[in-house]
Amino acid sequence: MINIQNKQDCCGCTACASVCAQDAITMTVDEMGFKYPKVDTNRCTNCGLCEKVCAFHDDYDKSNNFEEPFAYAVRHRNMEEIKSSRSGAMFIALSDYVFRQNGVVYGVGYAKHFRAIHKRITNREDCKELKGSKYVQSDLEGIFRCIKVDLQQGLYVLFVGTPCQTAGLRSFIGKRNSEKLLVCDIVCHGVPSPLLWEKYLNYIEQKKGYTIEQVNFRDKAKGWTAHYESFVFANGQKIITNTFTDLFYKHLMFRPSCAVCKYTNIKRPSDITLADFWGWEKVDSSFNKDNMGCSLVLVNTEKGKRVFEEVLPEIHIIPTPIDKCLQPNLQHPSLFSPKYAAFWKDYQQKGFTFILYKYGNKGTRAKLSRLKQKIKQIIKKVIRK
């Protein structure tokens, strides 16, 4: 039976719980807000399937991958789709293709109070909820089994998730039932805690005195390259901030397994990989001149290649050498902050507001740091003159 001794050994993909015919495994939340498998020994028959299905290791299945993926800069031909998407709207081109096959799409949407969960979507209108990145680990409870039923019924299925989620799904489904399964992963920086996301939302609502009605993890109001989250409240007020984003980029909130991610290379556990294309200027200086977003797309398998060719009428593309788009997380896992352990200890002992001010951009230290940076910039300008 599966037994997680070191939390770095589990990515929380739910493959083990999904494969258990006895329903002996439940995904339980720890003190950091991440889910791990817990085995009911009274139900367990020691069949070993939960250990066999786990794909969070270096020897995950790469048998369908090209020797090297085909890389492209991509933008949707419809500017409205780009404006409402995270980058170049490649996801919309793929989901539209699947709907034309009378298929279904699985991606990350929201449950009550903007809890990130994977959802099954059957039409283009509802698919709008899946657009844009969600910088928090999504809940996959029941999703793998639901996908298996769809495939058994002959439906075409698109699944989009983090690479650890896609690896877990592919291992759970197996090759025999995957002919109509199109799997897309994202170039993942790391997944923040759902618990801290919930605490942050509560903090903002308490400060503003109104409930949140809309959330955007990556608002393009200040351009694609700027990273600001935005919130719309019940009174109609909208705020744009980078407080949660600041903690995200400090690598303080990630799941422990993100430090040893197995998939930070170009042998992706998916048919197609989606990402922001940072450095697109090296390929074509005019391709994203409006700064509204450009997707990096890696085509990893023959199935991915066939689908990519099907959606070409909907997208602008520029082929690019793989060495022109090798982002850090296509080479190695994110490096955790040296303050990671202290951050979580402080949270558990002193609460969310304390860590927000001590480690985030809300406290006196952060304000002084920003002031020092401004002074340095002013001094440099004076010296130049």
Image: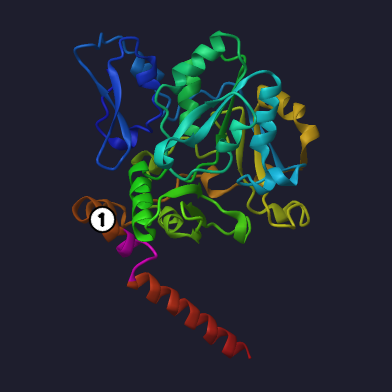
Along the line of sight, which residue is nearer the eye, 325 or 99?
Answer: 99
Taking the magenta stretch, the answer to whether it contains residue 360 is yes
Horizontal side of 242 relative to 267 (left or right) equals: left
Q: How far across and down, in percent of the image, does residue 304 sit? A: 66, 26
Q: Residue furthest front?
A: 235
> Going by the picture, which residue comes out furthest to the right?
313
Q: Please say if 206 is above or below 32.
A: below
Membership of 21 in magenta stretch:
no
Q: Nearer the viewer, residue 359 or 80?
A: 80
* CA neighbours of label 1 inside 10 A, class few (<14), some (14 to 19), many (20+): few
Q: Amino acid at mark 1?
A: Ala
What's the colour scheme?
rainbow
Q: Position of residue 356 (x, y in %)?
A: 33, 59
Which residue sits at x=42%, y=55%?
244
Q: Residue drawn 50% across and 54% down?
A: 229
Would residue 219 appear left or right of 258 to someone viewing this image? right
Location of residue 161 with respect to 153 vertically, above or below: below
Screen quadrant of the N terminus = top left
Q: In the structure shown, which secondary structural element does the residue marked by tag 1 occupy?
A: helix
Nearer to the camera, 12 or 258: 12
Range of magenta residues: 356-363
Q: Position of residue 2 (x, y in %)?
A: 29, 21
Q: Nearer the viewer, residue 294 or 301?
A: 294
The picture quadrant where one finds residue 159 is: top right
* Quarter of the C terminus within the rendering: bottom right
Which residue does the numbered mark 1 point to in the structure image?
342
- Determine if residue 273 is in view: yes
Q: Residue at x 27, y 29 (%)?
A: 4
